[in-house]
Amino acid sequence: MGELLKKNYIYINKAGQMTIKGMDIIKKNCSELGQKIFKDNLKAQILERKDCLFTKEYIDGLITEAINNNKLILAKRFNIKDSEYKSKTSIYSLIKDKYGAGEIMMIKNKNIGAGKGVKYCSLKEANDLPISDLDLEDVYKEMAPFIINYHAIKEQERLDEREERKRLRVEAKLKAKEDKDQVTLF
């Protein structure tokens, strides 16, 4: 279940003006994609409906449409120094080793580019990635206050993911046992 935060709300006064307090969507470090979805789609609907909750499917559609129109909206700017970094495993060092120094626009994803768990790839590489390979966790955190039952949905996704990993481990053990049994026959 989600945690209620103090000074984290949307208020519409009698004149129909919206006031937003404490939400990620108004903070300086909010993604360009999150801001675009809020300003272009959600804000007017919230004012009209006097309700700020939407289905996850609706938010998914807005995110997908915005990314399909312009993947650059996901890019994060990295200023990579030409000098050596103290930690060879820092994301800055890994980006420098793969892409060189300078100001580089990178897109967070799950599969290709520089990084260990979370990876950052170039804009050119990102063009070939399907949306499912892009790491949109930060955008969904910004959109969470606007998604009906977001925390329950996330918890169910975590449980489903855990079950899938468990199933894959069992399959791998069975396969290894079959392979071992095959080897002992010969």
Image (cartoon, rainbow, N blue to C red):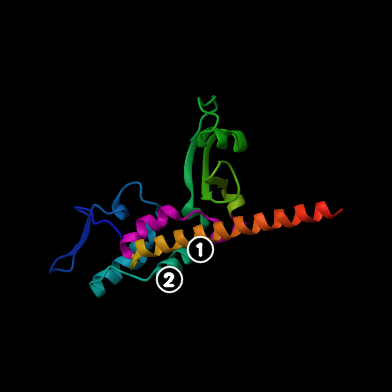
Is 110 on the left-hand or right-hand side of 171?
Answer: left
Q: Which residue lies furthest to the front in this view?
A: 185
State whether residue 103 is above or below residue 135. Answer: above
Q: Earlier in the sequence, mark 2 or mark 1?
A: 2
* x then y, percent, for residue 144: 34, 60
Quarter of the N terminus within the rendering: bottom left
Is 29 on the left-hand or right-hand side of 66?
Answer: left
Say what secondary structure mark 2 lies in.
Answer: helix
Q: Which residue lies furthest to the left in this view?
A: 14
Q: Can residue 35 be seen in this view?
A: no
Which numbered dot is residue 69?
1
Q: Is 49 inside the magenta-drawn segment? A: no
Looking at the rendered structure, the kind of residue marked 1 is Asn
Q: Residues within 10 Å of mark 1 (few under 14, many from 20)?
A: few
Picture residue at 35% right of the left edge, 46% below the top: 29
Say what secondary structure mark 1 lies in.
Answer: helix
Q: Which is in the foreground here, disc 2 or disc 1?
A: 2
Picture residue at 50% right of the left edge, 53% below the top: 135
* x then y, percent, for residue 121: 57, 46
State whether residue 149 is above or below residue 4. Answer: below
* x then y, percent, for residue 177: 71, 55
Q: Name the residue under label 2.
A: 57
* x then y, percent, for residue 165: 55, 57
Magenta-colored span: 127-146
